[in-house]
Image: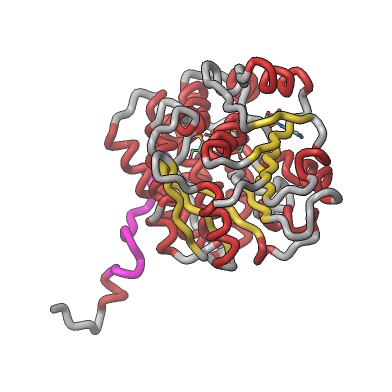
Amino acid sequence: MARKKVAVLVAGSWGTALSRVLADNGHRVLLWTRNPAQAEEINTLRSNGKFLPGAEIPEGITATTSIAEAVENADAVLFVSPSAAMRDVARQAAGSIPEGALVMHATKGFESGSLKRMSTVLSEELGRAEEKLVVLSGPSHAEEVIQRHPTTIVVAAQELACAEAAQDLFMNSSYFRVYTNPDFVGVETAGAIKNIIALGAGLSDGLGYGDNAKAALITRGLAEIARLGEAMGANVLTFAGLAGVGDLIVTCTSRHSRNWRAGSLLAQGNPLNEVLEQMGMVVEGVRTTKSAYELARRYGVEMPITNQLYAVLFEGRSPEQAVEALMGRVRTHEIEEVAWEARRGRTLN
Ligand SMILES: NC(=O)C1=CN([C@@H]2O[C@H](COP(=O)(O)OP(=O)(O)OC[C@H]3O[C@@H](n4cnc5c(N)ncnc54)[C@H](O)[C@@H]3O)[C@@H](O)[C@H]2O)C=CC1
Ligand SMILES: O=C(CO)COP(=O)(O)O
């Protein structure tokens, strides 16, 4: 594949790891950071010690503090800021992105207050149709990608050509395999909402519960993620894929997971503000719990785990009370569509 110029905004853990994949694929990467000391460290020491300690940054990556320089003449632009900074970063880049550049994002979250998906925020700020945007998601921790450990992700776009252009940029046969999916809304919502369940898994482990509890959180979490996603227009099958169950597994079980770690610190009795300070990296699940709690009300969807997480994070409920409330819920069917009422009148074969 021809060598492309790709701008990556910003130089956190995930932006840096994805830059390595692009550089390994022969592309020229301009990695933007607002922090001059970090740019200097990347360009001279070839390291990004705060976010990926011990990792070597390849020569194909150049850091810059000028967002205009990063995106100027770029063939593709990847946004990978925390969700809280997306609108601000997009606004800064908007005037300099070439008309024909492929625009992608790999951020997992919603905009607080407006509850908009990240692609909607990008579309508004960049003046581009959502149909032309690409979202990257799936089970992928930066700490493993930077070490070139085998990883699979999914790229979603409403137009196949856009998804395949992103697939071409990132896919390599040694450690990074990329699938395409036309269900843009499903991939984007699955990736955002899984962080709530990761917080819950961390809380569960922090309380000393075992694998049964975690498996329950993953599966029942998936059920409520899919319910909200479907109400927002997603294809329910997407939740059985990399962005759904795949990401839930990795985020609820990996020692690299920030959301899991934050949940386990909360279970030890640490206040939320101290946990976030101690983490030093973005913990998207906290904001996303609030957004999903509000989205569930907007779409009339039942999300019991999200509701309990919301009460623990923002209303002072103890994790033990939250577990009691979840276990004490009124009895119900596992899947409405296969419940007895729905089968009445059908012949079994
Ligand atoms: N770390 C990972 O393994 C993965 C992260 N993600 C997603 O990628 C997004 C970014 O996460 P990470 O890279 O892990 O975060 P991080 O905490 O490692 O880095 C965030 C970076 O954003 C910068 N930043 C924050 N606000 C800014 C602003 N207003 N303007 C410019 N720069 C700003 C920070 O200085 C920092 O360099 C999140 O939505 C996360 O869910 C997705 C998949 C994997
Ligand atoms: O989205 C991620 C991995 O796919 C990263 O989020 P966590 O660090 O919370 O697991």
**Residue that appears at 71% across and 29% down:** 63
Q: Position of residue 163 (x, y in %)?
A: 55, 60
Q: Position of residue 276 (x, y in %)?
A: 62, 24
Q: Is residue 118 above or below residue 310?
A: below
Q: Is residue 37 above or below residue 86?
A: above
**Residue that appears at 61% across and 27% down:** 59
**Residue that appears at 66% across and 38% down:** 29
Task: Please state if 7 lies on the left or on the right of 341 as rendered.
Answer: right
Question: What colouring style does the render use?
Answer: secondary structure
Q: Residue furthest front?
A: 2
Q: Is residue 49 above or below residue 64?
A: above
Q: Quadrant of ligand 1?
A: top right
Task: Please state if 78 lies on the left or on the right of 90 as rendered.
Answer: left
* Tally of numbered tags: 0
| Residue 332 covered by magenta stretch | yes
Depth check: give the residue in front, 214 or 59. 59
Depth check: give the residue in front, 271 or 198. 198
| Residue 24 covered by magenta stretch | no
| Res 148 quadrant in image | top left
Q: Quadrant of the C terminus?
A: bottom left
- Residue 185 appears in the rendering: no
- Residue 208 appears in the rendering: yes
**Residue that appears at 30% across and 74% down:** 341
Q: Residue furthest right?
A: 95
Q: Position of residue 320 (x, y in %)?
A: 43, 30
Depth check: give the residue in front, 286 or 344. 286
Q: Position of residue 310 (x, y in %)?
A: 57, 40
Depth check: give the residue in front, 167 or 4. 4
Segment colored magenta: 324-339
